[in-house]
Amino acid sequence: MNHRSHATRVLTLRRLQETLLSPGFYVAQVVGLFAGVYLITRFAASVDSSGFNFALDPVYDLIGRSLQGTFGQAFAAKLFSEGPFLFVLYMSFLPVLVYLALSSVFRFGLEKKAGAVELITYGPADGTACLLSYFVKDFLLTLTHLAVLIVFFAVAAALNNLVLGPLFFYSLGLLFFIALAVYAYGMLTTVLAPGNPASALAVFIGLLVFFLILMLGSFTVVSGYVRSLAATLAWIVQWFSPAYYWSLGFRAMETGNLPFFLLTVLLLSILTAAILTASHLIIKTRGVKA
Amino acid sequence: MKRVLVAALALLTTASLFADVPVRREEFIYSILAYNGRDYSGTFCREESDTIYLIADVDNFITTRKTFVYFWPITGDYKTDTSSLNEPQEGSLELFSRGQETQTESLSPMKYTYYNVRGEYELNWKVAKGEEAGQVWEHYSALVDAYWESLAAYQQEKMIYEMLLSELTKKIGELRQAGQDMSAVVEKLKSLEPPPEPKQPSEYIVPPVPVQQAFIINLPEGEYRIRFLNPDGSVMEGTEKKLVTFARKRSEGIAFEVIPGDRWTRPVESNTASSVLYVDGSSDLYLRPFFQLEFNDLFYEKMRKNDSLGNPNLYKWARIQQVPGAGIELTLPGRQATLVREEPFYVEQTQGSALGYQIVPFDPQGSHMGREPSLRAFHVPLEADTRSVSVRARDRQGTVLEGSSRQIRVVRDNRSGILLTLLALLPLAVLLLVRLKRKRVYGAP
């Protein structure tokens, strides 16, 4: 166990170095921050004597209509009740989440295919250490990005006389744990997918899209609720979806229910641990060969 | 052949000249008069709709009828055409809980009326059922009859008064022409007083509706099923519906209606304590605190309008009633809190060709004499240098109301975009530094 943790630590440092030396992470951050700048400044321009109004800015008008049409007026109102930062947080976080998750899946798949992982496992490291090193690298870079976002948004809030608000801070925590579950799914996909890194990537993207569709199916506005076999199956499957925990967490946040929020985070952590354990068992059984 | 073709083409094009008449379908509907926490609102459940939503533990009224139902694309909802067909259905309603089909309860139509009596504010709804409904209606009718009688008497007295007035005026004119003393007649004229105008019954804000018959549904929170039984006891086909009665989730919230001084027709609402009201500070604000209840978004929307959409995973606040005798505490940064009381205001159209309104203090002795105030609200002045104002409501006893704290922030376009853009480029600067350092150490990136 000590050998594995030491190997994980060394491999994580190597992965971090690789990521920090290449431009991808920085570019993803800048894309997220630019999205933030645009949305914050447009928000300030969408405020008149009676408050924030979607219709005053074409971009916010489009965003407002899309959100209201998909999730309902109550959702759109709650999302912007404290200001722009809750929505901006999601928009600024997304590029880095996508970059880290996809790059890890692709890179691990590539290393597996090239035999690099196999080579490492002849030494002091095993497949689990390789897998964990990617996960820990993503974990640390996500923390870094969230810290950058907090500082950036705090400056933006101070400059524009805006407030970050409790929902924003709840969401920070929730997003972090959701990101961990996504990275864990990335690792699981890589150990399950055969040979080609592109196929691992395709399976991973497909899985994320599936979870997103599932979430959209359960969180959107409806004309009534039904109890069909499909709905029951969807209800079971949604417990494996990080997006579902986002909807649970959002419900807890908007009602100010801290115990329910903590329970959501706990369940999400259990899901992440379970996926990582499954990945560990699979890689242990199947080995690291592509 | 050409003529035929031209004629056919002409016929085809004329079709577009006629209005697009929606298709009307004869349907059995449940007409619903549901209590929404503030007042009663009507909707209907058509045949295709499978569920009726009502608030638990309050009286709601359901009637059954056959009518024409059609989709109206302009508003995007279903409507009834009761002028062409409105056939109330006689029978009873069978009600049972989910999974307990053997334990049914039969409901018969009952006489009812509902009304809102005058109180400090508007929420004093009462429902009278059975015999009591008739008594309430008779009481209201008696008040109205008495008012009409006194109005008739008043008109009679007024006519006599005006006749007397004209007679005395004429007499004064004659005496003046004759050069005789008219002081006695003038005194008599001065002593004449017009009869007092009778006042309308003031007991009700919303008077009782004429006594009607309906199935009165007042159920605890839960899921039920209902179906309509014909007078012979048989079930009318296609009338079985699910009935969802729901309760509020939270009640400890205060909403603020916020009326900007320059746009009183566009009030906004602030529902949650964590919400922040951002304004541009171009005009003062006028607030009104309301009690509110939180309901499931889907259930509440469907209760108000059965064919609407809602999000079953979210809750929404519904405004109920203005907080009676409230005070609003305003705190500006670094200053002492001040307590603002409700005041009457009058809305005046702005002078000049530009459209717009302004809210001014109501002046009953001066320019607004003989008029009613346009609104009663709490005035929040916003000055040019105001950055934020903290607001919270206190009840009549001075206790701070839970969930009533809000922030009002003045957002001004301060051209922060350039600074934020530069900040957003910082990660690339970090990349550049990392690369340069590596190049210096290893000689290559």
Image: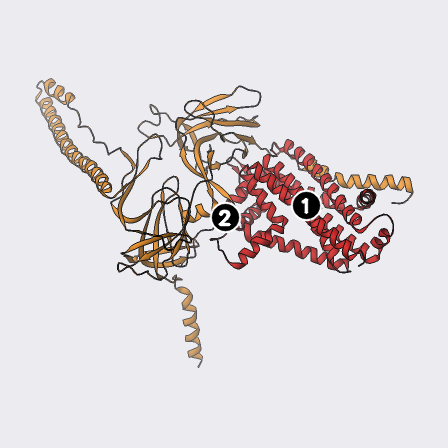
Chain colours: A red, B orange
B1 up-or-down from A189: above or below: below
Which residue occupies 62% across, 53% down? Answer: A211
Numbered disc 1: secondary structure: helix
Q: Is residue B110 left or right of residue A58?
A: left
Position of the C terminus of chain B by quadrant: top right
Q: Is residue B31 left or right of residue A173?
A: left
Q: Chain of mark 2?
A: B
x, y (%) of residue B433?
A: 82, 39
Query: Of helix, strand and loop, which one carries label 2?
Result: loop
Among all residues in the image, which is located at the extreme right? B443
Residue under the point 44% across and 73% down: B9
Whether pointer 2 and pointer 1 mark residues with C-beta atoms closer than 8 Å, the reply is no
Check the image and name the residue furthest to the bottom: B1
The residue at which mark 2 appears reads as B312
Circle number at residue A179: 1
Q: Front-most of A225 and B172? A: A225
Residue B103 in the figure: left or right of residue A104: left
* Amino acid type assigned to the residue bearing label 1 in the image: Ala
Instruction: Let me know if residue B348 appears in the view.
Output: yes
Front-most of residues A84 and A70: A70
Measured as percent of width and height from the top left, residue B430 is found at 79, 39
**Both labels 2 and 1 in a single chain:** no
The disc labelled 2 sits on which kind of residue? Pro
- Residue at the far front in the pictured view: B102
| Residue B358: % across, % down | 44, 32
- The quadrant in which the N terminus of chain B is found is bottom left
Alpha carbon of mark 2 to alpha carbon of mark 1: how far? 26 Å
